[in-house]
Each structure stands twice: as structure tokens, then as C-alpha cells.
Amino acid sequence: MNRKTNLRALRLRYEIPLSEMSAASGLSNQYISRAELGEISPTPRLEDKLGDAVDAVILRRRERLSALERSFTVHKGRLLQREEGVTDE
């Protein structure tokens, strides 16, 4: 039986790869996948570990989007101009 957990639904909806969850949680891709499919019994410790991993992913993405927003603001209206100080390889 292929049960879809809330974690799997969120991960797929927001395009979070297993590798990103693995890096954030310290758990293997395979272990997370098995947990998502209901093959591993959910424990409070596992729930906390995966919840902390999702929080970490959100924080990293928020920081990257903030950096993108700052950079975009600097270059808005000049997006197709050559980047200064960088040579083409």
C-alpha cells in the first residue's frame, strides 16, 4: 500500500528533494522515503527530527529568496545589461 503522508505531500508540492531533507535531518534518503510511505512507524522523535528538517529547509529558502530580492532590487531595470566585474568564460 502506497500511503501519502503530509510530509510527502508538502515535499512534492514545494519541490523539496529527498537529498535536501536528508542533509537537513541527518537521515538517509531511503529512510525518509520509507517513513513517508508509512513503512516505518512514526515516533515522536522521528516526527520532531523531520519537522526540524522542514523548518531548516524553510529558513534556508527564506534566506536565499531574501538575497535574491536584494540583488534583484539592485539590478531592476537593468537585468539585461552585462554584469560588472565578471568576465565571460
Image (cartoon, rainbow, N blue to C red):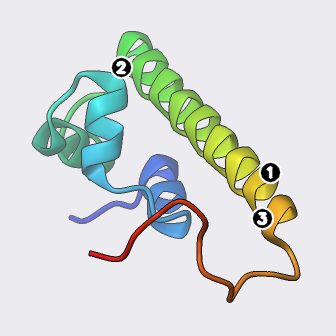
Furthest residue toward bottom:
80
Locate residue 31, reporting x and y percent. Answer: 15, 36
Query: Secondary structure beneath disc 3?
Result: helix
The residue lying at 26 percent from left, 40 percent from top is: 35
Q: Which mark is residue 70?
A: 1
Query: Secondary structure beneath disc 2?
Result: helix
Marks 1/2: CA–CA distance:
36 Å
Q: Residue 46 carries which label?
A: 2
Q: Are marks 1 and 2 in contact (CB under 8 Å)?
A: no
Which amino acid type is shown beneath numbered disc 3? Phe
Q: Which of 2 and 13 is in front in this view?
A: 13
Sequence-wise, which precedes: disc 1 or disc 2? 2
- Quadrant of the frame with the N terminus: bottom left
Q: Which of 7 and 18 is in front in this view?
A: 18
Among the 4 quarters of the image, the one containing residue 4: bottom left
Q: Residue 28 carries which label?
A: none
Rate crowding at label 1 as few (under 14), some (14 to 19) or many (20 or more) other CA atoms within 10 Å.
few
Which amino acid type is shown beneath numbered disc 2? Leu
Q: Which of 41 and 55 is in front in this view?
A: 55
Furthest residue toward top:
45
